[in-house]
Image (cartoon, helix red, strand yellow):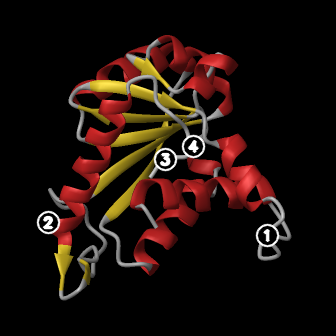
Amino acid sequence: MNAMACSVPSQEKKYAAVVASKRKKRASFGGYKMMNDDNSITTETALYGYIAENAHSSRFCAIVNKLFKGNNVNAMAIPMNIRPDDVTFTISQMRSSKLTGAVISMEYQEEAFSLLDHASEASQEAGYSDFIRIVDGQLYGELIMPSALEKFAQCDEFQDDIALNSMTRYFYELTTGA
């Protein structure tokens, strides 16, 4: 499911099993159970945060949520406007939150890396993390932007905002197994 090897391979397999289990529970008539018509979050919705100082002004969540909804995936990315003095507390408390993971904006990636329980090899080499998975109260950091650009930068579909479109598509595939 993941192109990057995690420093704890058994945990990566466990995460894949958790995601598969959630998908199986959500399956309905051969497909994913879509979010209800009023787009509300239920107890079965996989929640992903987008942590940035000005998350509300980024189109990341809107694009990812459109992919989720268009493919009948019961998941949602939520913009989280976090001030610099609150980022350590916010990321630390994700261990006990209802989030499945979070994408971390550039301004907080080094700080996020310092709070991880585990990190992928790519994240360790770079010294920062742009995506955090939460599994059994542990934070697993990954570096997904380089892989996203490698996979989608030459995509004819993305004429504008190549980085944003590559990141959202890669994030969607990573979190849904598509």
Query: Which tag is nearer the camera, tag 2 or tag 4?
Result: 2
Query: Which tag is nearer the camera, tag 3 or tag 1?
Result: 3
Q: Earlier in the sequence, mark 4 or mark 1?
A: 4
Q: Which residue is mark 4?
A: 55
Q: From the viewer's perspective, is residue 137 above or below residue 169?
A: above
Q: From the viewer's perspective, is residue 74 above or below residue 148?
A: below
Q: Residues within 10 Å of mark 1 (few under 14, many from 20)?
A: few
Q: Are marks 1 and 2 in contact (CB under 8 Å)?
A: no
Give residue 6's position: percent from left, percent from top.
46, 30
Query: Judging from the image, what secondary structure is the residue with disc 1 in?
Result: loop
**Amino acid carrying mark 3 in the image:** Asn
Q: Are marks 3 and 4 in contact (CB under 8 Å)?
A: no
Q: Earlier in the sequence, mark 3 or mark 2?
A: 3
Q: Which residue is mark 1?
A: 155
State the residue at coordinates (50%, 60%).
172
Q: Residues within 10 Å of mark 3 (few under 14, many from 20)?
A: some
Q: Which mark is residue 25?
A: 2
Q: Residues within 10 Å of mark 4 (few under 14, many from 20)?
A: some
Q: Which residue is mark 3?
A: 2
**CA gap, disc 1 to disc 2?**
33 Å
User: Toward which corner of the image does residue 156 lie, by quadrant?
Assistant: bottom right
Give residue 63's position: percent from left, percent from top.
58, 65
Q: Is residue 8 left or right of residue 127?
A: left
Decide if residue 108 is in sight here. no
Query: Judging from the image, what secondary structure is the residue with disc 2 in?
Result: helix
Query: Judging from the image, what secondary structure is the residue with disc 3 in?
Result: loop
Q: Are marks 3 and 2 in contact (CB under 8 Å)?
A: no
**CA gap, disc 4 to disc 1?**
26 Å
